[in-house]
Amino acid sequence: MTTTTKPATPVAATRGRRPGAGGLALRQGRLEITQFLRSRESVVFTMGFPIIMILIFASIFHGTIGGGVKFTQYFITGMIATGLMTVSFQNLGIWIPIERDRGVLKRYRGTPMPKWVWFAGKVIMVVAIGIAETALLLAVAVALFDLDLPGTAGKWFTFGWVAVLGVTACTLCGIAISSLARTARSGSAVVTPVALVLQFISGVFFVFTDLPTWMQQVAALFPLKWMCQGLRSVFLPSSFGAQEPGGSFELGRVAVVLALWCVIGVVLCLTTFRWTTKRDG
């Protein structure tokens, strides 16, 4: 009796295989996630800020804001939206200038790796950290403050597309605004004030309709306001839509505005992104 064995694949040949496009993106994504987790300051601020804020607001504000809606139920929408904005817009707007100033992007551009892989890695990192952050925030709110989660598949679907469009728009805008910082140190000075102003005027820390009309109109020009409004349709009763400035949650307009900002973000990235600092040419 004879047996046949399948020839073993040479080790050298196995090691010499190049990963496909998806494999390259996943490797870069894992690298970006690892680098993010190694920065304790980024982890604490990005993951902890929304949770700390909901703990503060839930401890200070009790009762309801009307219609039987608890303060926690209302403010969780703003905390989720600002958490997604923090991990995308703010995080990228601060860290990309640091990488540019250190010459990381210049060296990367000189490698045979396709440039899109670097961007894909950033997107994978944002999505992974954003999902983890949102899940942790919801778990804390449910455990400590009896948050009512969406009860229908339709509301979860709305949650999904609002989050996807919102984080896409914020990611693209974060990459674009990173070109405004001239040095690594100036990244935070450029991005943080913009993020804070948007949070204050978009209904994150206050009931949106309690803000001055002119402030509401300014907020309506930017994605964060629409992210918050879309998420309110998920976590608040349908009847609460009548209290919105437009008389409803206006989900169609939410989708249009967020999609428009995705297009604007792409245009800004293509026209403004720089791999090197001005002193490098």
Image: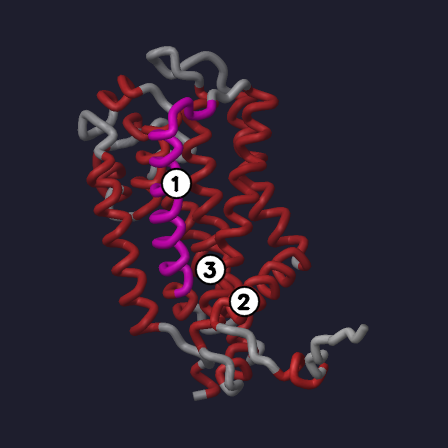
* Kind of residue sitting beneath label 2: Arg
Q: Nearer the viewer, residue 15 or 152?
A: 15
Q: Nearer the viewer, residue 3 or 76?
A: 3
Q: Secondary structure at mark 2?
A: loop
Is 264 on the left or on the right of 53, as rendered? Answer: left
Instruction: Report the residue marked by disc 2.
Output: 185
Total marks drawn?
3
Is 208 on the left or on the right of 127, as rendered? Answer: left
Instruction: Report the residue marked by disc 1.
Output: 160
Please name the residue shown 45% across and 73% down the image.
182
* Kind of residue sitting beneath label 1: Gly
10 Å neighbourhood of mark 3: few (<14), some, or many (≥20)?
many
10 Å neighbourhood of mark 1: few (<14), some, or many (≥20)?
some
Q: Secondary structure at mark 1?
A: helix
* Kind of residue sitting beneath label 3: Val
Q: Nearer the viewer, residue 200 or 10?
A: 10
Say whether disc 1 or disc 3 marks the residue closer to the N-terminus: 3
Instruction: Report the residue marked by disc 3.
Output: 123
Q: Main secondary structure of the magenta part?
A: helix
Please name the residue shown 60% across and 59% down the image.
33
Residue 134: give x, y in percent of width and height.
Answer: 51, 39
**Quadrant of image for the C terminus:** bottom left
Q: Is residue 155 magenta?
A: yes
Q: Nearer the viewer, residue 57 or 185?
A: 57
Q: What's the magenta region?
A: 149-175
Labels 2, 3: front one: 3
Residue at mark 2 to residue at mark 1: CA–CA distance: 35 Å
Above/below status of 163 relative to 90: above
